[in-house]
């Protein structure tokens, strides 16, 4: 039952994360991809130009695959994270693990999430970079899916999986590691023993900061992933060398402002949704589990031994009668 609660919490958090951060995600993809005729001076210019020339709804382009990706990533990620914590005996109700353990748990989680989200990421990137797209709903997604599978086969859905793993393993290492370590720090500062007792404001802050830390350090992998998955490039290492040669090292950090500006509200909402859902659902499942377990049989009272032992076992009132 605990796994189902974790999965549900991940889904709620993923929905909050997507709604809060998608416009910045669209801007990030466009800033990273670049291209003639579509150069932007920065985040604000990208957001304003996109809204002015394509309509405000263009900032939510790729909503279906983005939400699908977030649901896959966070339902899998939260479930794997908490299952590993229970297996190691460091669940919320137990002892808080070290920073090294938190980082290791995040790294393992990143392998699972990479595989789960790759098809959605490929479709999302292609929709977000299509400047001429009129219909950005499910019909456009199905057209893109048919086009991709028709031209590249099912393997096209895993285009850029290497770049994605290179991004998500270090990202989840830093993201989950930072989030849980910050929660531990705030628990100590506020004097609470369990994370579920930590005020939601601290959860919100921990999630936002964790997202900013993660995205700041893994953005070069995300730039490479975006260009590979867009279909403009095919191999990651030659692409890295070409970016550095033509754009400088700063080319590997294109879209940094959009990524970090998005990271705080999106990931703060993610973990706020996860923790609030967990706190609402776990008491109900605990009560249901408790009623499913039959109560233990009543204890059988010990029979006092004969002699002096029997006198010692008598209650004060019985001693008076004796």
Image (cartoon, grey):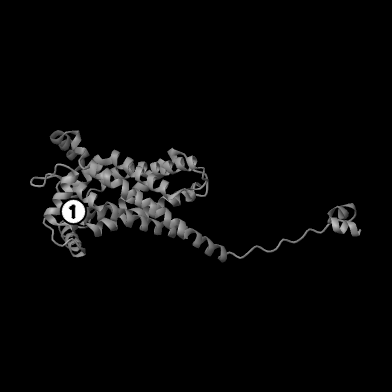
Could one spot residue 234 in this view of the protein? no
Whole-percent x and y of residue 117? 29, 53
Q: Residue at x 31, y 42 (%)?
A: 212
Q: Name the residue beneath numbered marker 1.
A: 128
Quick one: 282 or 165, which is closer to the camera?
282
In the rendered image of this protein, does residue 307 appear above or below residue 261?
Answer: below
Whole-percent x and y of residue 114? 31, 50
Q: Residue at x 16, y 49 (%)?
A: 48
Quadrant location of the C terminus?
A: bottom right
Whole-percent x and y of residue 147? 15, 60
Q: How many marks?
A: 1
Q: Residue furthest left?
A: 37
- Whether residue 316 sits left or right of residue 280 in the image: it is right
In the rendered image of this protein, does residue 44 appear above or below residue 152?
Answer: above
Quick one: 201 or 262, which is closer to the camera?
201
Q: Residue at x 23, y 52 (%)?
A: 23
Instruction: Please identify the quarter of the rendering in which residue 16 is found.
Output: bottom left
Q: Residue at x 42, y 55 (%)?
A: 276
Whole-percent x and y of residue 34? 14, 44
Instruction: Please identify the quarter of the rendering in which residue 144 is found.
Output: bottom left
In the rendered image of this protein, does residue 5 appear above or below residue 175?
Answer: below
Q: Residues within 10 Å of mark 1 (few under 14, many from 20)?
A: many
- Whether residue 101 sits left or right of residue 42 in the image: it is right
- Whether residue 46 sits left or right of residue 283 in the image: it is left
| Element assignment for label 1 | helix
């Amino acid at each position: 039952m605990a796994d189902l609660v974790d999965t549900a919490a991940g889904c709620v958090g993923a929905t909050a994360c997507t709604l809060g951060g998608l416009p910045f995600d669209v801007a990030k993809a466009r800033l990273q991809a670049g291209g003639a005729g579509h150069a932007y001076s920065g985040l604000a210019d990208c957001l304003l130009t996109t809204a002015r020339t394509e309509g405000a709804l263009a900032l939510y382009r790729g909503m279906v695959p983005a939400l699908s990706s977030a649901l896959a990533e966070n339902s899998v990620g939260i479930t794997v994270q908490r299952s590993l914590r229970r297996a190691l005996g460091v669940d919320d109700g137990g002892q808080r693990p070290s920073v090294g353990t938190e980082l290791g748990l995040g790294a393992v989680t990143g392998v699972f999430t990479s595989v789960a989200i790759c098809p959605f990421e490929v479709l999302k990137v292609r929709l977000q970079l299509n400047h001429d797209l009129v219909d950005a709903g499910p019909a456009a997604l199905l057209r893109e899916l048919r086009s991709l599978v028709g031209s590249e086969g099912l393997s096209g859905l895993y285009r850029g999986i290497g770049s994605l793993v290179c991004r998500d393993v270090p990202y989840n290492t830093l993201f989950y590691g930072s989030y849980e370590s910050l929660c531990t720090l705030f628990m100590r500062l506020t004097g609470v023993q369990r994370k579920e007792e930590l005020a939601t404001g601290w959860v919100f802050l921990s999630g936002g900061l964790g997202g900013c830390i993660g995205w700041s350090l893994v953005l070069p992998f995300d730039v490479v992933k975006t260009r590979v998955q867009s279909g403009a490039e095919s191999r990651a290492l030659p692409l890295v060398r070409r970016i550095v040669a033509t754009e400088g090292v700063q080319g590997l950090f294109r879209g940094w402002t959009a990524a970090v500006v998005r990271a705080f509200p999106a990931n703060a909402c993610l973990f706020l949704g996860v923790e609030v859902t967990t706190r609402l659902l776990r008491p109900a499942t605990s009560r249901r589990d408790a009623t499913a377990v039959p109560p233990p049989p009543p204890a059988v009272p010990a029979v006092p031994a004969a002699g002096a032992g029997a006198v010692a076992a008598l209650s004060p009132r019985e001693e008076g009668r004796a």
